[in-house]
Image (cartoon, rainbow, N blue to C red):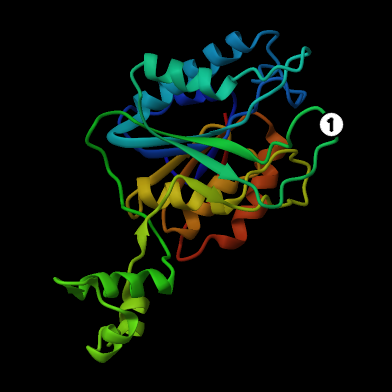
Amino acid sequence: MKNIILHGSAIDKLKTIPENTIDMCMTSPPYWGLRDYQEDGQLGMEKDYNEYITKLCDIFDEVKRVLKKEGSCCVNLGDTYLPNKSLCMVPQRFAIEMINRGWILRNTIIWQKPNAMPENVKDRFTVDFEFLYFFVKQPKYYFKQQFESIKYNSLMRKRRGNNKNKYSGYQSLSQVRENKGYDNLDEEYNNHPGRNKRAVWNINTTSFHGQHLATYPEELCKTPIDAGCPENGIVLDPFMGAGTTALAAINLNKNFLGIELNKNYIDMAMKRIQPYLEQGKLFQKEIL
């Protein structure tokens, strides 16, 4: 199954997917106690966050089953405040339970939001980030290294360091110039892959003109999908929502498989995805 959105609960539909068939999972589940989607069997409206975490991890037990041995799973999850104003620490509790169930946690990534909305609070700091957890099934897994750009001055400092004088240490900039230490620096900069990508990602939130109340930005999905899913592989999102994961997968030449409880969101996702499907890729809506 690929390029399909299955209609139903995540755990029920995951059980219909054969094991070891999915390359990677990229998703953002409904947060606990935040929004009521008015759907029977929805996740997030449990009376206790412990019940929520148990249900959520039961779903990811099935995700683990359908993932290939070399597969990976990225989960974006935010926190909630209790009536006594304390943070619940839901993301951390979720990550610990996932580890207890056999997942390997490779990274805790911070999604920092430069354009975060101001909060009307006067007794704490404004929260402008969320967590993105990077899990794998086994120590050896598929991963395409990701890079981020480096500053031009960093290469100049590197060149300066490569032209050391054993008596006086680093050469002066004038000495480097005299020794043509900056020869082909522009070419090197243009061809340099960059440094290994860090774990704090500055990505703006994006607005979506539709009925869905919580969409994460496509930019947040692109790096995990590019890193964790090989060309023409399948990206799973068991909480497809408005289809952002599918959009990112298509734009990176991957296939997608979605699950969504709300039929209206499936229709919404189809309208977003359809214009981006090219080169014979077929989008299907499967109501089961």
Identified at 42% across, 20% down, the residue is 98
Judged left or right of residue 120, residue 254 is left
Q: Which residue is situated farthest in the front direction here?
A: 167
Judged left or right of residue 280, residue 118 is right
Coordinates of residue 227 in the picture (x, y in percent)? 37, 49
Identified at 75% across, 26% down, the residue is 35
Judged left or right of residue 223, residue 231 is left
Coordinates of residue 99 in the picture (x, y in percent)? 38, 19
Q: Is residue 137 above or below residue 2?
A: above
Q: Which residue is mark 1?
A: 122
Identified at 69% across, 44% down, the residue is 267
Coordinates of residue 194 in the picture (x, y in percent)? 36, 64
User: Residue 12, can we see it?
Assistant: no
Q: What is the count of numbered marks?
A: 1
- Label 1 secondary element: loop
Circle 1 crowding by C-alpha within 10 Å: few under 14, some 14–19, many from 20: few
Judged left or right of residue 114, residue 56 is left
Along the viewing direction, whichever of 107 and 9 lies nearer the viewer: 107
Identified at 51% across, 42% down, the residue is 4
For the N terminus, the quadrant is top left
Quarter of image, res 288: top right
User: Disc 1 marks which amino acid?
Assistant: Lys
